[in-house]
Image (cartoon, grey):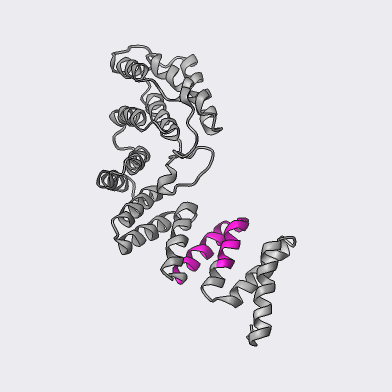
Amino acid sequence: MSELESSQKVRFPLNKRTCDVNQSVKPDLVLPKEVRKKCLNDFDKNYDSSVEPSVAKLFELGNEAYKSGLDMEAYNYYLKCISSGIESSEILFNSFKNIGNILVRAGDLEGAEEFYNKAYTIYPDSDILLVNLGTLEMQKRDLERAAERYRMAVDVNPSNSRAWIGLALVHREYGDFDLSWGNIERALDVDPSDETALEVMIEWGVKESRFESIIDRLETYININPQNIYMMETLVKVYVVGGRLVKAKNLIHDILLKYPNNTQLKQILNTLETNENINGVVS
């Protein structure tokens, strides 16, 4: 199964396949109700055909377009798969699920829910789909239902970091900051490289002065992903905000050895050294 896409509303990574409902909607991408109904009715019929190479190829082309962010092309390929009478549960599930993701991106939440529900009838224990459904409920502002979906996802797969992020965001909306923080910690426990969880932790942690936790998680991330200059720069800034000025300077020097033209870090370093000279701080 392809990796989950989620909405900007719940702060999931914004990449080529993000479900960002703030993007401009392509009118011809939203499936008309009558066409949607026909597709869903067609799916309910009994087919006795096997997976034909032509349908498998359509699905492959749909996946390629989907991964490339070509939503309209992917959408059409998946619809052809669904309408073909194919019996393959995997192809049908992913076609329904991915069309649901595309419709969320287009802002058609009603259409997305219908296709997600059809996917759910095929694989109700898919933690990826359950997180998608939780994200959809977040878009609809049904926090109770969203939490239920996310809990179902972690019951199926406790290592799904996206589900823990979703729970964190729901509990944050409810005002339960300690529980939401624990959920974000859990997300990073199961996947220390989850950049979304890390970004959420940084945002919340800076506001709540949880610098030790943020620094520990950032240092762990950088040990795993030493080429991520953005996260290294972020760690420098967290060091500075958290008062770890010596560590900030040392890290800046390390980064400048690899990226000597990084003007932003040079400016930060200059500011730190100027303040040292003024205040007589010994590093």
Residue 282 appears in the rendering:
no
Give the quadrant of residue 43: top left
Give the quadrant of residue 135: top left
Q: Which of 35 and 223 is in front in this view?
A: 35
Percent of width and height locating residue 151: 28, 48
The stretch in magenta equals: 212-237
Q: Which of 52 and 213 is in front in this view?
A: 213
Q: Which of 108 and 157 is in front in this view?
A: 108
Percent of width and height locating residue 174: 28, 56
Most common SS among magenta residues: helix
Residue 101 appears in the rendering:
yes
Residue in the image at 33% along x and 30% along y? 110
Percent of width and height locating residue 152: 28, 44
Q: In this view, does 137 lie above or below 241?
A: above
Q: In this view, does 265 lie above or below 80?
A: below
Residue in the image at 64% along x and 82% along y? 283
Q: Is residue 46 above or below residue 226?
A: above
Residue placed furthest toward the bottom: 280
Q: Is residue 161 above or below residue 79?
A: below
Query: Total marks drawn?
Result: 0
Give the quadrant of residue 247: bottom right
Residue in the image at 40% along x and 48% along y? 10
Q: Which of 42 and 31 is in front in this view?
A: 31
Residue placed furthest toward the right: 261
Percent of width and height locating residue 71: 50, 28
* Quarter of the figure with the N terminus: top left
